Amino acid sequence: MKFTLLSLFPEILESYFSSSIMARAVEKGIVSYRNINIRDFAVDKHRTCDDAPYGGGPGMVLKAEPLAAALDFAGAPHLRTLCPTPSGRPFTQDYAKSLSAEEEIVLVCGRYEGIDQRVIDLYVSDEISVGDYVLSSGEIAAMVIIDAVYRLLDGVISLDSLAEESFVEGLLEYPQYTRPEVFRGLKVPEVLLSGHHANISAWRREQGIMKTRKYRPELLAGRKGYEI
């Protein structure tokens, strides 16, 4: 899968693709990426990419001309193009799964007060919100989307690990423990030391339901079979 990113600060993104699990996915050829600097498409000597908003107001807006030229260069008119924004559609695990079926995705990393709406109208297929809060960096929001998507690709993470994560069955994931058995007076639950796989599975399901009920009760609303 290929990720093409348009940014004013591509150096932020470069370190992400060269670290940890993502670096291994790139080395294996599972993931490829391309960073495009929007400033390279500005036409003035100062490489200006922003201007004051029409109608007044604080902040600056990313200009249409350099961003559209960068998108043309990326092939965006023919590719699924995402724009992270607080006013977009909520990003979910199911949304990430649908994006993981694409061969290539283009992401526009916004800055300041946002980007000229005409660019969105002409190029963007998905406006996506990664949460009900505002970030100053579209690069960070883009990395959130990429991280949720690429880990679903075959060969990145084991299928067993993916099968028991939060949201896979509409529940939050159960608590995890590792050595030592006792840490600062807190013991690992006995059931996890029993070796009884059926009991461990039942305990984990119960804990997942309890955690979901505590932190995300809306996920259980109207669903049957999740009573403890």
Image (spheres, rainbow, N blue to C red):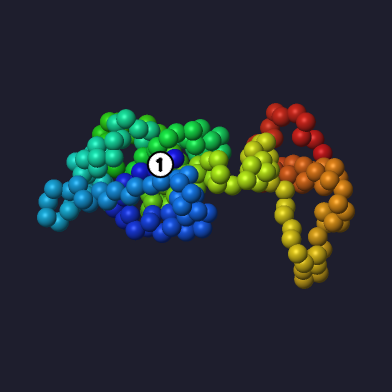
In percent of width and height, residue 81 lies at 36, 36
In percent of width and height, residue 55 lies at 22, 41
- Vertical placement of residue 99 versus 26, above or below: above
Q: Residue at x 32, y 30 (%)?
A: 78
Q: Nearer the viewer, residue 226 or 196?
A: 196
Type of amino acid under label 1: Lys
Describe residue 116's horizontal placement relative to residue 187 as left or right.
left
Image quadrant of residue 104? top left
Q: What residue is disc 1 on?
A: 2
Density class for disc 1 (Cα within 10 Å; few <14, some 14-19, many ≥20) is some
In percent of width and height, residue 127 lies at 40, 36
Q: Nearer the viewer, residue 77 or 157?
A: 157
Q: Residue at x 21, y 50 (%)?
A: 40
Secondary structure, mark 1, is: strand
Taking the view exactly as shown, the residue that stands out farthest to the left is 45
In percent of width and height, residue 120 lies at 31, 35
